[in-house]
Image: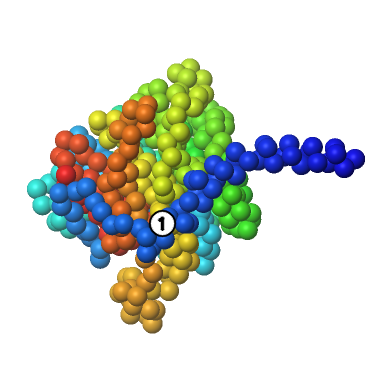
Amino acid sequence: MAPTRSIILIGLVALAGPWVYDKYTGFGQMFLKNTPAKLPSMNAFSSYKVLFQDTIRNCEDAVIDEDAGMALLSCDPGRDWWNTVMGTFISSHKEGEIWSYLYSQIDVEDEALLHPLGRHGFPADREFHPLGLEYEPASDTVFAVNHASSGSGIEIFKLSPTREHLLWERTFIHPKVHTPNSIAAINEHELFVTNDHYFLARNFKPFSKIETYLGLPLGEVLYVNLKTNEVRTLARLGFANGVKMLNKTTLAAASTSGPDVYIYSIDPETKSLTQKLKIRVPFAPDNISVDSNGKLLIAGHPYPPTMEVVSSTNHEYDLDNANDGRKPASERPRAAGWIKEWDGNPEGKTRDLYIGAEYGTTCTAVRDVKRKMGIITGLYEKGILVWKE
């Protein structure tokens, strides 16, 4: 029996070895190389500025309409108390909002260019904690992942003809869409959606953490048909996060605990996915975006421990100048951010656009190629960073 057990043990080690090595060279290396003392600070911008710090904060996602010179921002100051991904469940009463930013105007710093869109017709008994955001311009449809305390779902809105408010149409909830995070619209009724975890942090917090830090491939990329209610799993990856279509036949999906971005070819008929490429990045990728030149912008978090500290303590600091006895905002912990650009070539060439803690917890970067500018959002930051190239 002893030789048999030894053979089995050797076989298990041989099978697990490549997986362990991959986790060590990827997610594990972040803990060794990206400590705050070691992390460099740089940016590739001609200029940049953090705007609207007294108006918006905790903006998770952003999408732009380059033709209109408009950005939509998914912001939630209540994230300090309620974050179903990071596992913060103190209170869900302070809600979020989708904001419109008309950055194409001459004075991009003008506060008048930024306004909340509101949610006309939205159910009064359902909270709004927006996360992933998508805009389908052909139909003026806005999709928003909502992590309400009553259950996560996808809110479907129409942008009004004046682009001044949102008209709520319905909430899509499905048992297979149990941890929605990010959305990529094929059209107004077909979507790619990521489930970031198999274990919900609100129900199985320890298992959710284990799933994250071991990089278990239990997250999903889903095909969702809003007309037929069809939901299919297309791919599995660890902590499935941002998802975007590079073009009609190519999809990119971020694995936060990879840390990788997967590139898939899309079957035009079945929408099934075939992996073409895996891009490894030196940080935990969050949301991704594609500019009009086909370049992929990858935003993320270089050192998970500091991100964990910020997510668990941000509520202790008076970020809204409420003078309510909380600690001064100037004393709050910081977590750096990292933005990379992939040029779209199969060789997987990338370059750094931003690394630093001046504007941290970076989770989305979007670019307007025509106007040579871009926007970065921070999951636990005040305002947004606007850069010029």
Q: Residue at x 35, y 58 (%)?
A: 39
Residue 69 in sight in this render = yes
Q: Quarter-wise, where is residue 160 in the image?
A: top left
Of 142 and 236, nearer the camera is 236
**Residue at label 1?**
34
Q: Residue furthest left?
A: 106
Q: Residue furthest bottom?
A: 325
Specify the quadrant that holds the N terminus: top right
Of 358 and 118, nearer the camera is 358
Q: Residue at x 50, y 57 (%)?
A: 86
Residue 77 in sight in this render = no
Left or right: where 369 falls relative to 32: left
Q: Secondary structure at mark 1?
A: loop
For mark 1, does the 10 Å Cα neighbourhood hold few (<14), some (14 to 19), or many (20 or more) residues? some
Q: Quarter-wise, where is residue 75 in the image?
A: bottom left
* Image position, residue 135 (x, y; %): 34, 38
Q: Is residue 224 above or below residue 41?
A: above
Q: How many marks?
A: 1
Q: Residue furthest right?
A: 1
Mark 1 residue type: Asn
Q: Is residue 32 above or below residue 192?
A: below
* Image position, residue 115 (x, y; %): 24, 54
* Image position, residue 220 (x, y; %): 55, 38
Q: Residue at x 74, y 39 (%)?
A: 10
* Image position, residue 351 (x, y; %): 29, 41
Specify the quadrant that holds the C terminus: top left
